[in-house]
Structures are given as C-alpha cells and as structure tokens.
Amino acid sequence: MDRCRPTFAIELLERIKHLFDIPNIVFVLSIDKQQLEASTAAVYGSAINAPEYLRRFIDLEYGIPAAHSKRYTETLIKRFGLEPVFAERKSSEVAYDRKNFVDFFTMLADAVGLSLRARERCITRLRVVMDLTPPNHYLDPILVALLIVLRSNKQDLFTRLISGEAHAETVMEYLASLPVASLTIV
C-alpha cells in the first residue's frame, strides 16, 4: 500500500477496515508505516496527526528486524549465480575479489543508506560486469563496488566521473562526507 498513489492507499485502507470489520476476521498489512503516514498527510494535509489516524486501522504492529547487511549481500551474490563466476577467478591477483567486493560493497551500501531493493539492482549490475569481464582479466573489486554504488546512489557524481568532468578527488571528498561510523567493515 505504501507504494500506491496516496489517495488510493488511504481509500484502500479505509475500505479494508469497513469491509473486514467483522468479529474473528483479522487482516494483515505489510507496509512501510512512515511512507503510509506521509500518504495520510498528502491526502488530509500536514496538520493531521498521521500516526494517530492510522491507529484507527492498525491494532497491533510488528516490526521486521533489519536484514544483516553482509549476509544480505552474500545472499544476493548466491541468488544472482555469482559464486561460480567468482570461483572461476583463481589466479593470485583475483583470488580475493569476492571477499573484497562483498566487504567493500556492504560497507559503502551501509554508509550511503542503500535500500535492499537498490542493493539488489547493484548486484544485477555486478552480474553484467562479471559476465563481460573474462576470468583471467584483473577486475578491481573495490573500484567496481564504488562505481556500482555511485551509479545507484549518486548518479550525478557517477556521470561526471565517467565523463571526465569529476576526478578521484571529488569522489574522495564525497566519501569523506559520509558518517565515519558507517565506514567500518562488519
């Protein structure tokens, strides 16, 4: 519902409540509550107390714990079939590409606050890069992770960088602006 047009989301919520307001009937909503609160404010104005309004429809709330970032990256690597692609890269120069990519990508994704969906798109791009790079060619996993994250999160900087308008110093300034606590490998 939180991905729907605000008016549709609120109308649907109200209809669900009226339609299923029957004893022993329970309905479960999977929502981004903050987004639904924003939709409520968009429909009824910023003066509305959105959390209070939503309590009319939501009796119990359960939060899903955040995914463990590194494990999620590992899962995406497996799901996109990159295990054998990394395993194929056996020479001494590329033997640690997988670990280095996972560690650095996870750190960057956490630092810039990439959503799970954005991380999935990044690993899709990694798959394309890996498919186009012969296994015996050097592929700097840290640079690839950086470029993939920039492409997803900082499109303007990425475009300027690949066109030659921005230089490494600009990227370093951007990285230096990220919260220091988020730049640790877990």
Image (cartoon, rainbow, N blue to C red):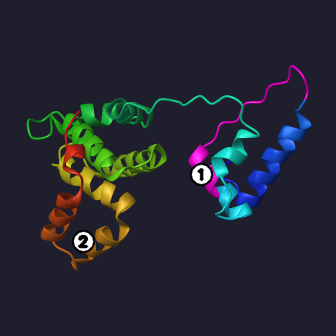
Between 29 and 97, the residue placed more toward the observer is 29
Between 131 and 148, the residue placed more toward the observer is 148
- What kind of residue is marked 1? Gln
Q: Position of residue 76 (x, y in %)?
A: 41, 36
Residue 26, by quadrant, is top right
Pointer 2 local density, CA inside 10 Å: few below 14, some 14–19, many at least 20: some
Disc 1 target residue: 35
- What kind of residue is marked 2? Leu
Confirm whether residue 73 shows in the render: yes
Q: Earlier in the sequence, mark 2 or mark 1?
A: 1
Lateral position of residue 159 relative to residue 91, left or right: right
Instruction: Tell me the residue at 38%/51% (across/down).
Output: 128
Which mark, by number, is residue 176?
Answer: none
Local SS, label 2: helix
Local SS, label 1: helix
Q: How far apart in space, not on screen, are marks 2 and 1 (Cα)?
A: 33 Å
Q: What are the residue bounds of the magenta stretch?
A: 22-38
Disc 2 target residue: 161
Q: Nearer the viewer, mark 2 or mark 1?
A: 1
The prevailing secondary structure element of the residues shown in magenta is loop
